[in-house]
Amino acid sequence: MKSLKFRNGDQIAQIGLGTWKSKDGLVGEAVKTAVKSGYTHIDCAATYGNEAEIGEALTDLFDAGEINREDIFITSKLWNNAHKKEDVIPALKQTLSDLNLDYLDLYLIHWPVAFKSGLEGMPQSDDDFVSLEDLPIIKTWEAMVEAKKQGLVKHIGVSNFSIKKLKDLMSKTDEHPEMNQVELHPYLHQDELVNFCHENDILVTAFSPLGSQDRIPEMKADNEPSLLENPVVNAIAEKHDVSAAQVLLNFHLQRNCIVIPKSTNAGRIKQNLKTANFDLTQDEMNELKTLDKHFRYVNGKFFETSDGKYENIYDE
């Protein structure tokens, strides 16, 4: 499996199993299938609501000798309702309890958005949001750094951060983010952001690499373009005798990014891992680059407020 290195030399597999939208009763088996198929990287988050089931699966895998704890890389994310400095480590400890782990390999600030402390579910009004002026990201970050010092996490980073937000955070701390997890695919290259991260020794993970077609209807736009049905993607897939999904995943490997496709289908989980067995040519990468339309499947509008606390969270 191809891997990338953190600043301290630790490695992370470029293909991981995503668990967003993986249903109860299926996600545990998906994790078991993934690990038995050769995955060493599982991406989780508190807000996905399935970390307890994943934790049971991990315990079963460790007990059965399928994999050792030190040989698997587990990521999770801090939800928006725990951004207060005093809430970060308790939220992390809850995730560790749910996952049946003593430490995480990577912990990310999920969004540059803050909710009222302990808010259950999504905000129902503007009053449920806390502005970044009142609760600056640096305060949250300081608690992330403390969690790392305590040995609760090995690496810390962010998710859905723009260059502007990265620069602002980096200007206020010596402990720079080690990862930025963002939406990336041939319709959304974000070259400037990816290059900035690479230039500053920040690894990049791509989410929604296949277009996230199974997200809830409220998050979908009318007439969304389909990545899996794109004729350029499918023509390239035919040349390599692989699936369209494998082409879309390989796109990120060629860009030195990590990618975390979600699936609970055993066949697709195994097929996704085989993406590392071929390489796209430079001409094919150039073809895929012509598809960029800066289209976001996860547009962040569900975090916009009418009172101006949050407008364009991507700073575009």
Image (cartoon, rainbow, N blue to C red):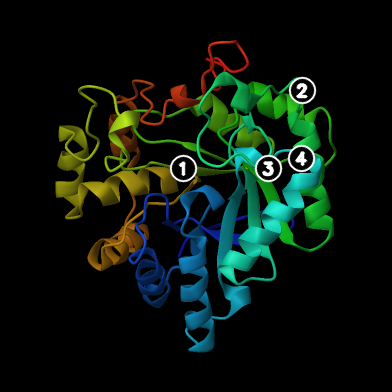
Q: Amino acid at mark 2?
A: Asp
Closest to the observer, 196 or 63: 63
Which residue is labeled 4 in the image? 141
Q: Which mark is residue 134?
A: 2
Q: Residues within 10 Å of mark 4 (few under 14, many from 20)?
A: many
Mark before the other along the chain sequence, 2 or 1: 2
Give the distance between the C-alpha atoms of the residues marked 2 and 3, in whole angstroms.
14 Å
Which residue is labeled 3 in the image? 82
Frontmost of labels 3 and 4 is 3
Location of residue 88 with respect to 267 vertically, above or below:
above
Residue at the limit of the structure toward the top, as seen here: 307
Give the distance between the C-alpha atoms of the residues marked 4 and 1, in whole angstroms.
22 Å
| Rendered location of residue 173, percent (x, y) | 84, 35
Q: Amino acid at mark 1?
A: Ala
Location of residue 114 by image quarter:
top right
| Rendered location of residue 312, percent (x, y) | 53, 16
Q: Amino acid at mark 3?
A: Ala
Mark before the other along the chain sequence, 1 or 3: 3
**Secondary structure of the residue carrying numbered label 2:** loop
Q: Which mark is residue 27?
A: none
Q: Amino acid at mark 4?
A: Trp
Is the Cβ of the residue at disc 1 closer than 8 Å to that at disc 3? no
| Rendered location of residue 239, percent (x, y) | 16, 48
Instruction: Write the residue at 75% across / 20% down.
Output: 133
Which quarter of the rendered picture does the N terminus lie within? bottom left
Give the distance between the C-alpha atoms of the residues marked 1 and 3, in whole angstroms.
24 Å
Frontmost of labels 2 and 4 is 2
Instruction: Write the residue at 70% across / 38% down.
Output: 83
Location of residue 131 by image quarter:
top right
Is the Cβ of the residue at disc 2 closer than 8 Å to that at disc 3? no
Location of residue 288 with respect to 304 vertically, above or below:
below
Which residue is labeled 1 in the image? 206
